[in-house]
Amino acid sequence: MTAAPERATARDTAPAETDAAPQDRASFPHVREIPTRWMDNDTYGHVNNVVYYSYFDTVANAFLIEQGGLDIQADPVIGLVAETKCTYRKPLTFPDMVAAGLRVRRLGRSSVTYEIGLFRGDDREPAAFGYFVHVYVDRDSRRPVPVPEKLRRALQAILVA
């Protein structure tokens, strides 16, 4: 995740209800399978905490590219991460298959709050649950701009009440 510069901040970040939101697999309208890798495990025999954030990035950015038509190399608007959180509930290990559930909790003018559940195999309860906030900015000036319409349409499809 690319850290947001100081002047690109989310006015409304993750809502208080994020921690209490439904967190079973069925509450995520978009799911992407992500295999763990041998190198993801740490010396304690489970996936290292920092790797969970790469799973967050993978599910969200793949969705934006595949469903929203995001061109990460050429689009004049980019999403920068302004805030993030992960709650770890049970370990993932290699060779687990991770089902990364994605939903949008809040879709603002220039920011989006994503929620992600990471599920081991067929588990209904998440091994980890978290969120992150993208602030959309002009690629050159890094000033906040409205979420592009093509992305907004895709994000609305996974927006939960």
Image: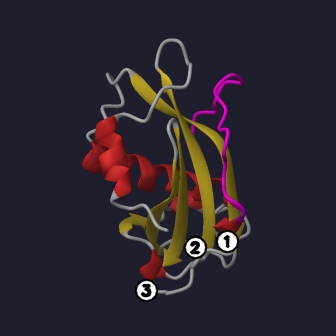
> How far apart are labels 2 and 1 at the CA level?
7 Å
Q: Amino acid at mark 1?
A: Gly
> How far apart are labels 3 and 2 at the CA level?
14 Å
In the picture of the structure, the residue carrying the numbered disc 2 is: 93
The spot of residue 85 in percent (x, y) is 69, 56
Between disc 3 and disc 1, the foreground one is 3
In the picture of the structure, the residue carrying the numbered disc 3 is: 122
Query: Residue 57 has which mark?
Result: none
Sequence-wise, the earlier of marks 3 and 1 is 1
Q: Is residue 101 left or right of residue 68?
A: right
**What element does badge 2 sit on?**
loop
In the picture of the structure, the residue carrying the numbered disc 1 is: 45
- Main secondary structure found in the magenta portion: loop
Q: Is residue 13 above or below residue 18?
A: above
**What element does badge 3 sit on?**
loop
Kindly indicate whether the residue at mark 1 contacts the one at mark 2 (C-beta within 8 angstroms): yes
Q: Amino acid at mark 3?
A: Asp
